[in-house]
Image (cartoon, rainbow, N blue to C red):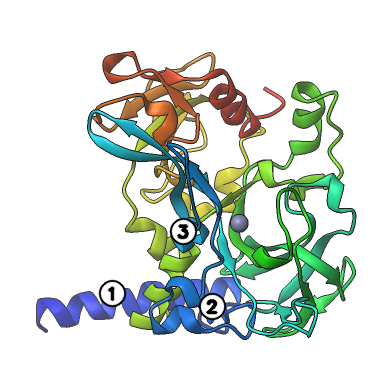
Amino acid sequence: MSRALRLGAIMLISAFIPALSEGRSEPLNLALPTENDAFFRGGGPDFYQHIIRDFKGVTTRPWQGGQYGFVRNPVETGGGLVYTRFHEGLDIKPVRRDARGEPLDEVRAIAEGTVVHVNLVPGYSNYGKYVVVEHVWDGSSYYSLYGHLASATVSRGAKVNRGEQLGLLGYTGDGLDQARAHVHLELNLLLGRNFESWHVAFFKSDPNRHGLYNGLNLTGIDIAGLYLALRKRPGLSIPEFLEQEDTFYKVTLPASPNFDLPRRYPWLLREGGSASAPAWEVSFNQAGVPLRITPASAAVTAPTLSYIRKRGGDYAGMTRGVIGGSGANARLTESGLRLMRLLTWPD
Ligand SMILES: [Zn+2]
């Protein structure tokens, strides 16, 4: 057998075992959430809703600001323009409006799942009215989020099929108007089971009205990249997609019985793991999505930055404020430390 054939056979076997043990029946098949399919014809201004950018006294309306990633709040640095504000989803513009300009697009589930959260009070969230759908793929739960809706047509607990309507596209939430109506779409991992008590501990004056499905507890993967990767390679899984992402920093966490990320996403233990490690090192991409968990050899008493990729300039703008300082002085910021404690809360 050739090496390629042998590798193929091994991959086939390893793809087959989870299918047996975890009941995966269908490959990942994500629909777009509205009729707007310009994404697959190059994206750009036909797909993404623009943002309003005031930069150096000039106002522009770049559609690029609607993409996933570091696409907002440019700052001039010695190394050129750096976009310091992260956008965790896609802002998809409507394709239908009535005579008064009100958007008419249906917002639909990107895959089969269960509605786990519906927020109907715009003022309770930057997302305005939003719906969260839980999808179970290969035994792990992922959460698609649909923000700025005009209305929701589903309630919590509803089972929905791929393409089933969840609501109507709108412009609820801070800073939007009719012209900039869009659905904000995310696909997330859930960070902590004990989010609610963590939130009470750190944000007493700001009540959490969304249970586990507060945006702070959801970390959005590069869903645009995933749609494109699935077109090239149908059958790709999210663990395989994330395995291709680059590690930007690593944080070592104290051993804790509350560290449930590897139970929720066992594929993060890519080299396997022992239950008795004195600490765990979590690798994150630049967006703060966990990519890998490995046992660490030495114990720590608090989350500690153990690696960061070398880059010039202040790390805060490159890491959504999780890491601060520059060069050898890089460290977890106060909010970064808080976020890491969520992973093992109550610590
Ligand atoms: Zn958005």
Dot 2 alpha-carbon crowd within 10 angstroms: few under 14, some 14 to 19, many 20 or more: few
* Quarter of the N terminus within the rendering: bottom left
Taking the image as drawn, is residue 295 in sight?
A: no
Dot 1 alpha-carbon crowd within 10 angstroms: few under 14, some 14 to 19, many 20 or more: few
116 lies above or below 228 = above
Asked whether mark 2 lies closer than 8 Å to ligand 1, one says no
Q: Which mark is residue 93?
A: none
Dot 3 alpha-carbon crowd within 10 angstroms: few under 14, some 14 to 19, many 20 or more: some
Residue behind mark 1 = 10
Residue behind mark 3 = 62
Mark nearest the camera among 3 and 2 is 3
Q: Residue furthest left?
A: 2
Image-quadrant location for residue 25: bottom right
Secondary structure at badge 1 equals: helix
Taking the image as drawn, is residue 2 in sight?
A: yes
Which residue: 50% across, 65% down?
223
Mark nearest the camera among 1 and 3 is 3
Give how far across and how far down residue 233 sits, in percent: 35, 80
Q: CA distance from mark 2 to mark 1?
A: 16 Å
78 lies above or below 213 = above
Amino acid marked by disc 2: Leu
Q: Which mark is residue 20?
A: 2
Secondary structure at badge 2 equals: helix
First along the sequence among labels 3 and 2: 2
Ligand 1 quadrant in view: bottom right
Pick the front one: 10 or 94: 94
Give how far across and how far down residue 55 sits, in percent: 45, 40
* Quarter of the C terminus within the rendering: top right
In the image: residue 233, left or right of residue 69: left
Amino acid marked by disc 3: Pro
